[in-house]
Amino acid sequence: MTTGNSNLPLVWDFIDRKTEVFTDLADRVWETPETCYMEKLSAAAHREMLEAQGFRITENVAGIPTALIGEAGEGGPVIAFLGEYDALAGLSQKAGAVHQEPLIPGANGHGCGHNLLGSASLLAATALKDWLEMTGTPGRVRYYGCPAEEGGAAKAFMVRAGAFEDVDIAISWHPSNFAGVQRETSLANCRIDFTFTGRAAHASAVPELGRSALDAVELMNVGVNYMREHMPSDCRIHYAVLDTGGISPNVVQAHAKVRYVVRAPELPGLLALIERVKKIAEGAALMTETKVESTILAGVSNLIVNKPLMDAMQDIWDSMGPPPFDEADVAFAEKIRATLTPEDIAASWNQERLEPRDIPLADFVLPAHNEVRQMGGSTDVGDVSWVVPTVQAYGATLAVGTQLHTWQVVAQGQSALAHKGMVSAAKAMAATGLAAIESEQLREAAWGDLKKRRKGQEYTSPIPPGAEPPVAAMTVK
C-alpha cells in the first residue's frame, strides 16, 4: 500500500462523520466499569452500536454471555477488528481530576483504557464497512467484542471455539503514551488455582489429628520461590492466597487456596514450567498429608508479531502523524504529569528505547525499527496472533509517563486528548484494514510471515479441553 491511496480520505471521512457517537460510546463504557466476564452493560452498549451501524450480530460467542461478533459485507477477504471493554477492580477515579479521588472508594475503573479500545476498534470496523458498501467492493468486516482481557483470556476461549477460523487479517490497538505500531511480543501465561484439603482439629488439644491445608499453601509458595533460581530468567511466577482456611488460629485449617500466574516468553516453555509448579504443589501436599486439586482458569499464548502488516501500518502512521492535540490538551497533560514520579516518566521513554524529552504529550509517531522486543505483560491477543496474521497499533491517549493500571489512566479516560488519540488509532486501523482488503500480496506476505515465525509449531491452546470460561471476576493482570 502507498500513502497516496485515493481511498484513504474516503475511509477517514467516514470516521470523522461518526467520531461524536463513538466517543459517546467510549464515555458510556467508562461510566459503567465492569470487570472480567461481568461486562453486561458494556457489551450491551457495543451491541446497540453494532445494530445501529447495520452489522449482523452473533452473541454468546464461545459460550461467553458478554462476547459478541458483528459482521458486514459479502465475499472477499475477512478483516477482523478486536475490541475490548473490561475494567479493573479498585481503580475508581473521577474523570478530569488531577489528584487521586475515587468516584466510589474501592469500585472499578478503566485503568487500562479499554473503554477507548473497544470504541475505536468498532469505529474502524464501521468506517471500513461503510467504504465497502459505498464502493461495492467484495469483503467482510468483523468486529469482535472481547470481554475479560484482564485475566480472563476470553479471546483464547474464542480461538479454541473456532471463532477466527476464516479470518484473513486481525487488527487491534491499545491506549498508550505514544502513537505508532506495536512491535513487542508478550508473555504466554496461565492462571491456576491450587486447592488444598486437610483435616480440621483443635490446634492445642489434639494438633496431631490435624492436617493443615494452610501449611501446604505456605510450603508450596516456599518451594516455588526456591525454584525461581532454577528457571529461565525471562519467565515470571506470581501468586495470591485466596483462602487461608479461616480466622481462628486455634483451629487447624482444613481448606486453603492459592492462585498462581505462570508466564513464559513462548507457549512450549510455559507448559513445561506449569508442570514443575504442579509437582511442587504435589510435594507440598505429600509433606502435609493433604490433598491438592489444580484448576486452570485461563491461559494465553505469547504474541506473534507480523512484519508485513507492521510495515503497512507504519506507512499509514507516518502519513497521518500524531493526534492533533491543542493547548488545552497539553495543559491537562501537564497537570497529570505533575502527579507522576521521575521514574514513571523515564520508564515510558525507556520502554520504547527513546531519548527522553521534556514534553507532556507525544508530538511524534514512534519510529520504525526491526527489533522485536519483549513486553513484560500478557494479552489474549496472543492466541489470535497464532492462528491469524495480527497487527496492533498504539494510540496516544495518555500524558507521557502515565503507567497503565493506575488512577491517572482513569482520570484521562474521558478527556479530549484521549478522544483524539482514540480517533487517530481508529484511522490507522481502518487504513490498515483497507490495505489488506485491496492487496492480496499483503495478505499472502502476512500469512507467510506468520508461518515462518511459528517455526513449524501448530497452535496448542493453553486452556485444557473441558475448561469453561470462568464467570467470577479475576483481578491482577
Image (cartoon, rainbow, N blue to C red):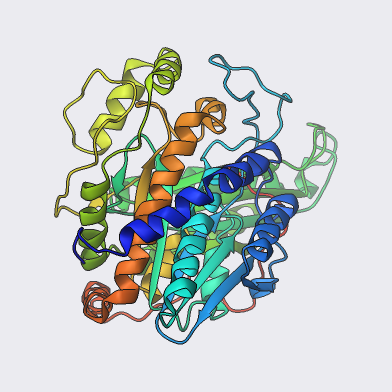
Instruction: State the residue lying farthest toward the bottom.
Output: 75
In the image, 261 versus 23, the foreground residue is: 23
The x and y percentages for residue 456 are 25, 82
Q: Residue at x 46, y 69 (%)?
A: 80
User: Residue 472 vs residue 56: left or right?
Assistant: right
| Residue 188 seen | yes
The x and y percentages for residue 8 are 32, 60
Q: Residue at x 47, y 82 (%)?
A: 165
User: Residue 440 vs residue 58: left or right?
Assistant: left
The x and y percentages for residue 156 are 52, 68
The x and y percentages for residue 221 are 52, 44
Residue 46: which quarter of the image? bottom right
User: Residue 159 vs residue 204: left or right?
Assistant: left
- What is the quadrant of the N terminus in the image? bottom left
In the image, 194 versus 10, the foreground residue is: 10
Q: Is residue 170 above or below residue 375?
A: below
Q: Residue at x 30, y 38 (%)?
A: 322
Q: Is residue 148 above or below residue 358?
A: below
Q: Is residue 435 above or below residue 284?
A: below
| Residue 477 seen | no
| Count of residue discs | 0
In the image, 160 versus 15, the foreground residue is: 15
Q: Is residue 108 above or below residue 302?
A: above
